[in-house]
Amino acid sequence: MRLVLAAVGRLRKGPEADLVADYLARFAKTGRALGFPPVTLTEVEDKRGGGMAAEAELLNRAIPDGAVLVILDERGHMLTSPEFASHLGAWRDQARDICFVIGGADGIDPSLRARADLSISFGKMVWPHMMVRVMLTEQIYRAATILGGGPYHRV
């Protein structure tokens, strides 16, 4: 099983990069006991001149064959943290690779949206894709704590 986070653009040093690194490190520790591998972060070039289609081509290369494809999209489903954890746990139990995709400034190409097994939205507002990385990595870590019965998630 592999967990991949494929994102358009390079995350520069700063608070967002620090938070992403922190949540990925927390997940690596917590997830190991639950049968999860560490998350591999793959960044592809922002193709402002080539548009979403060029970005989709680069993202496609980062998606493992046969992986569950989860995209972050403003039109996606708004899940609770326990619902997200349930999805993650089910895919782990099926020994499926999982690839989370975060698009660039213009979003995700329709060809990738059509292929997605799950489309997730973090609300009706549009978020900068660098902030979405932070929110997604936090939710991946939170899912592991929920699946492990840890105290991090409180309802």
Image (tube, rainbow, N blue to C red):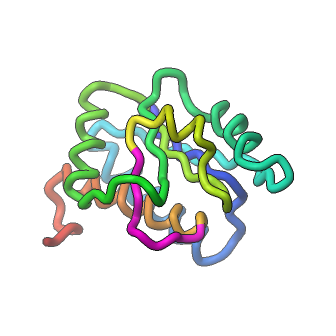
Above or below for 45 versus 59: below
Q: Quadrant of residue 152?
A: bottom left
Q: Position of residue 123 (x, y in %)?
A: 39, 68
Q: Residue furthest top?
A: 66
Residue at x 22% of width, y 52% of height:
83
Q: Judge left or right: residue 11 versus residue 112.
A: right
Q: Residue furthest bottom?
A: 15
Residue at x 63% of width, y 44% of height:
109
Residue at x 38% of width, y 42% of height:
118
What residue range appears in magenta?
A: 119-128
Above or below for 45 versus 127: above
Q: Judge left or right: residue 18 versus residue 118.
A: right
Q: Position of residue 68 (x, y in %)?
A: 42, 32
Which quadrant holds the C terminus?
Answer: bottom left
Q: Is residue 84 magenta?
A: no
Above or below for 94 versus 126: above
What is the chief secondary structure element of the magenta stretch? loop
Of 115 and 98, nearer the camera is 115
Q: Quadrant of residue 37?
A: top left
